[in-house]
Amino acid sequence: MPTFHWKDPNAGAAKRVAHYLATEVGEGNVFKKSVLREIIPNTEQVDRRMRDLRKVHWKIRTYRDRPGLRPEELLLEKIGHRVWEDGYKWPQDGLSTAVRRKVLERDGPRCMVCGIDFGAEYIDHPGITARPTIGHIVAKERGGTNELDNLRPECHLCNEQSRNLTASPIDIGLLQRRILQLGRAEKRKLLGWMRAERRSFTDTELLWAQVCRLPRPEREAIQRDLESAVEL
């Protein structure tokens, strides 16, 4: 039986992309999306297939995750499932576009774990912006379902099981000291989030989430009205 090769035009796009990255690029190396587009001319298909690989434990970083990368560059941080091998079956997450949209419309464009707004820069990871994903409150491995009440918006860092970041790991001792230095009210608030395993939001924060979903002209109109009200 012939060995699979990324040059095979009859093979699936995801298999070709994965095999090329694994055999020609290698873990820890940078590549350009334009090269993949030469292999598979359909630009949209290449982008989609790379996103699909992230679902099966491939870690492909962009300039949003690695400030040192250029916009056209990507870093192959980790090779995941060898999807080109005979008999490989893609896992089914069962989340349709409609379900994902309902979750975001219900909870707003922010991470329900750490509270960051999607598109905002992480305070502790300068240069990296939060990308939206949908996570499970009770993990599927522990019996969680894809029902709406078990789904929540999560940023890509909170959603990842392993975080291979260039930043230094969290100093647990320093974190504990800073928490104990909080006022009583702030300690109660943090404790409530930890017990609920999610952050609660104030009315103002909920309004902000709705403002973020508006087109720019409408946001600017609200901003002008608010500026006028504050100046009165």
Image: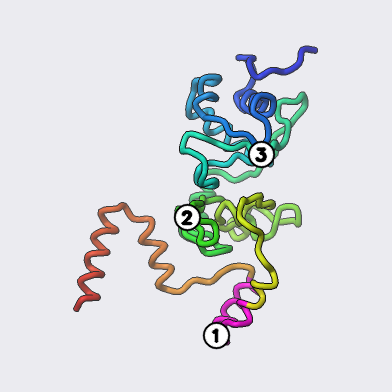
* Residue 18 higher or lower than 207, as above or below: above
- Asked where in the image residue 143 lies, by quadrant, the reply is bottom right
Which span of residues is magenta-colored?
Answer: 178-196
Residue at label 1? Answer: 185
- CA–CA distance between discs 3 and 1? 42 Å
Per the image, label 3 sits on a secondary structure element best described as loop
The label on residue 58 is 3
Residue flagged by tag 1: what amino acid is it? Ala
Q: Is residue 212 left or right of residue 93?
A: left
Q: Is residue 191 left or right of residue 200?
A: right
Q: Residues within 10 Å of mark 1 (few under 14, many from 20)?
A: few
* Residue 31 higher or lower than 99, as above or below: above
Q: Is residue 204 left or right of residue 181?
A: left
Q: Main secondary structure of the magenta part?
A: helix
* Residue 6 higher or lower than 45, as above or below: above
Per the image, label 2 sits on a secondary structure element best described as loop
Does any portion of residue 35 appear in the rendered image?
yes
User: Which residue is drawn at the image coordinates 56% and 64% (left, top)?
Assistant: 114
Residue flagged by tag 2: what amino acid is it? Phe
Q: Residue furthest right?
A: 1
Residue 89 x/y as whole percent? 73, 32
Residue 198 x/y as whole percent? 59, 67
Q: Residues within 10 Å of mark 2 (few under 14, many from 20)?
A: many
**Quarter of the picture holding the N terminus:** top right
Residue 199 x/y as whole percent? 56, 69
Residue at label 2? Answer: 118
Residue flagged by tag 3: what amino acid is it? Trp
* Mark toward the start of the polypeptide (2 vs 1): 2
User: Which residue is drawn at the image coordinates 62% and 36% (left, top)?
Assistant: 76
State if disc 3 and disc 2 touch (CB < 8 Å): no
